[in-house]
Image (cartoon, grey):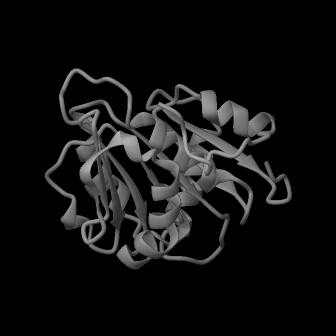
Amino acid sequence: MSLTPAWRELRPHKVQSQLWRTTARFPVVVAGRQSGKTELARRRLVLALQERKPWPDPRYFLGFPTYRQAEFVAMEKVEALIPKDWLVKDGFNKSKLTFKTIFGSTLHLVGMDKPHRIEGQEFDGGVLDEMSDQRPDGYTRTILPMLTARSGWCWRIGKPKRAGIGAAKFREAYELGLKPNDIGVKSFTWKSDTVQ
């Protein structure tokens, strides 16, 4: 199965390559606008869709501060990355923002403004984007419990901001990942002018 034309060649710099290869469960990425962090995250999620798991229904998520952002910012770009032959018949559900694959996996695009919409499920991995604008308790109260049973992973990514509802918590997470820790948090950063 081949990838789509949206998989244009990237030229990642050293830190982006380290992020791509990290075995940390909970990477925290702070980088500026147009720096490549979201593109890397989308690709990581799409490639995860074909990974074999001990269970038949791997689940992944891409979360934004609001449902509207998930629809407006991510839907078309994620759809362009997923080869059509990876999807089951009618595998893209535009009203639910889900992609169901022939591998049994599903990718959910979600808004963290209403996290209860995804609560109660177990996830294998995911990405939370625009963390400075996400509700500060969404990660700990909603996402972490859903990753526990399957030892799932989560990239938290965003621009560095002083303001924003989740800016302080995002900064705390980044600072934690700069130090050795035994909970799988590792931080990565690069300037926005280092385009891949």
Residue 128 position in % (x across, y down): 45, 56
Residue extending furthest right?
193
Horizontal arrangement in the rendering, residue 77 relative to residue 162 (left or right): left
Seen at 28% across and 33% down, the residue is: 103
Residue 6 in the figure: left or right of residue 47:
right
Q: Relative to residue 51, is residue 15 drawn left or right?
A: right
Does 104 sit above or below residue 195?
A: above
Task: Name the spot of residue 39 as percent of width and height, x first.
Answer: 62, 52
In the image: residue 49, left or right of residue 16: left
Looking at the image, which residue is at 56% across and 45% down?
4
Q: Is residue 131 visible?
A: yes
Residue 79 quadrant: bottom left
In depth, the one of 164 and 23 nearer the eye is: 23
In the image, residue 86 above or below residue 18: below
**Please, is residue 191 above or below residue 146 in the view?**
below
Task: Name the residue rendered at 53%, 25% in the picture.
Answer: 23
Residue drawn at x 62%, y 42% as measured from the top left: 187
Horizontal and vertical percent position of residue 170: 54, 59
Quadrant for residue 113, please give it: bottom left
Quadrant of residue 33 within the rendered picture: bottom right
Residue 1 or 31: which is nearer the viewer? 1
Q: Can residue 65 be spotted in the picture? A: no
The answer to which of 129 and 185 lies nearer the viewer is 129
Residue at the outermost left position: 120
Q: Position of residue 87 (x, y in %)?
A: 32, 45
Which of the pair 46/187 is nearer the observer?
Answer: 46
What number of labels is visible?
A: 0
